[in-house]
Image (tube, rainbow, N blue to C red):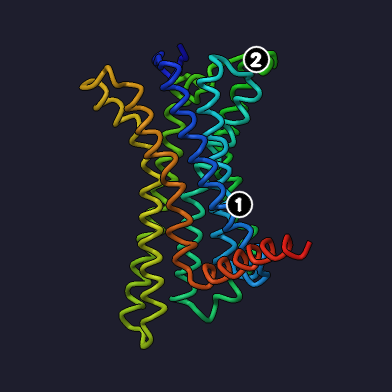
């Protein structure tokens, strides 16, 4: 038997079921990162993209999703591979996982602000949204995203001996930081972050909508309005992970025998699948980016086919 643990319960899976779940999760993780990797390669294949703040923010979102997938899948597999994990490794993974989770909505807010400036203040866009300022903004949101986890670790260091990091622990956030104050701090930071991002999205959308109605050429403004809506959809996908505990709490009592299947399905739908939709929502929709990707990879395929015939 293989045992999977969550923060409060021991959940027992048969070997076949555990193996199947891990194969599904790892396979989806590899597929999603392969697709995202193609987008990253496309971005760096053309210097034009690295000079546009819109594409810089987009590719940062993609890279952040790739990192989040790697960490999430690693933690998922570790819960099956071992009951206890080295504390230093676990704290590092949880720290990075929490930071990447916080960075996603902040990056979406930055993308919304960039589109707002491009449509509502076009004369200021080239001076305001420079690559240098975009890189500074990315560094800033990483600092903000890392603050909650960094605060937890500093509090832990002040209360626990250093030998803790040489021990083994249950690798779950609420097992690592079990105090009620910590749970309240995590909840508060996430609520504040999401509320701020929603305020930015609603404000920028309303301003773009107002500008689109007055614009003589409605094409770009209408497209920006659609982009804002997609930012909102993506933010809703990010927030799906918040409802996982609630779904487990309400659904599992009705189907206690299928507890492991329910938790697996919820994890798949709220943590893995939203990462697949990010490149489809933005990358494939952008004609300039899609054209470059087709040209680049078509060229690579042709070269690969020609080289063996010349040998």
At x 30%, y 80%, the residue is: 213
Give the residue at the far right of this rendering.
311
Q: Nearer the viewer, residue 213 or 56?
A: 56
Query: Mark 2: which secondary structure?
Result: helix
Q: Position of residue 39 (x, y in %)?
A: 57, 58
Res. 64 in view:
yes
Give the residue at the far top of this rendering.
1
* Residue holding disc 2: 164
Task: Write down the quadrant of residue 132 in the picture.
Answer: bottom right
Task: Write down the quadrant of residue 262 in the picture.
Answer: top left
Q: Position of residue 94 (x, y in %)?
A: 56, 30
Q: Nearer the viewer, residue 266 or 99?
A: 266
- Please determine whether, in this image, residue 117 is positioned above or below residue 112: below
At x 53%, y 26%, the residue is: 77
Q: Nearer the viewer, residue 191 or 302?
A: 302
Q: Position of residue 195 (x, y in %)?
A: 38, 48
- The numbered mark at residue 231 is none
Give the residue at the far left of this rendering.
254
Quarter that holds the C terminus: bottom right
Label 2 Cα neighbours within 10 Å, binned few <14 / some 14-19 / many ≥20:
some
Cα–Cα gap, marks 2 and 1: 31 Å
Query: Mark 1: which secondary structure?
Result: helix
- Please determine whether, in this image, residue 62 is positioned above or below residue 206: above
State which mark lies toward you, 2 or 1. Answer: 2
Res. 131 in view:
no
At x 46%, y 33%, the residue is: 186
Q: Position of residue 120 (x, y in %)?
A: 43, 76
- Please determine whether, in this image, residue 168 is positioned above or below residue 74: above
* Residue holding disc 1: 140
């Amino acid at each position: 038997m293989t045992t999977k643990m969550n923060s409060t319960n021991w959940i027992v899976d048969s070997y076949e079921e555990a193996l199947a779940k891990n194969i599904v999760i790892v396979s989806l993780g590899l597929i999603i990162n392969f697709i995202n990797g193609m987008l990253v390669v496309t971005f760096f294949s053309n210097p034009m993209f690295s000079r546009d703040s819109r594409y810089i923010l987009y590719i940062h979102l993609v890279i952040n999703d790739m990192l989040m997938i790697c960490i999430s899948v690693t933690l998922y597999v570790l819960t099956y591979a071992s009951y206890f994990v080295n504390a230093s490794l676990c704290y590092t993974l949880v720290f990075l996982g929490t930071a990447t989770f916080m960075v996603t909505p902040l990056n979406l807010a930055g993308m919304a602000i960039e589109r707002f400036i491009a449509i509502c203040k076009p004369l200021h866009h080239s001076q305001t949204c420079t690559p240098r300022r975009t890189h500074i903004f990315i560094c800033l949101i990483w600092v903000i995203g890392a603050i909650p986890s960094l605060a937890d670790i500093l509090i832990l260091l002040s209360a626990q001996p250093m030998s803790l990091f040489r021990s083994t622990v249950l690798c779950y956030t609420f097992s690592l930081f079990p105090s009620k104050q910590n749970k309240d701090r995590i909840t508060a930071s996430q609520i504040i972050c999401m509320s701020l991002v929603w305020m930015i999205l609603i404000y920028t959308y309303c301003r773009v909508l107002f500008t689109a109605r007055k614009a003589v050429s409605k094409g770009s403004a209408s497209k920006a309005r659609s982009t804002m809506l997609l930012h909102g959809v993506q933010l809703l996908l990010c927030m799906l992970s918040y409802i996982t505990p609630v779904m487990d709490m309400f659904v599992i009592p009705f189907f206690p025998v299928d507890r492991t299947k329910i938790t697996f399905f919820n994890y798949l739908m709220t943590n893995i699948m939203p990462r697949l939709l990010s490149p489809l929502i933005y990358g494939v929709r952008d004609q300039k980016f899609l054209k470059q990707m087709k040209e680049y990879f078509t060229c690579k395929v042709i070269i690969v086919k020609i080289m063996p015939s010349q040998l």
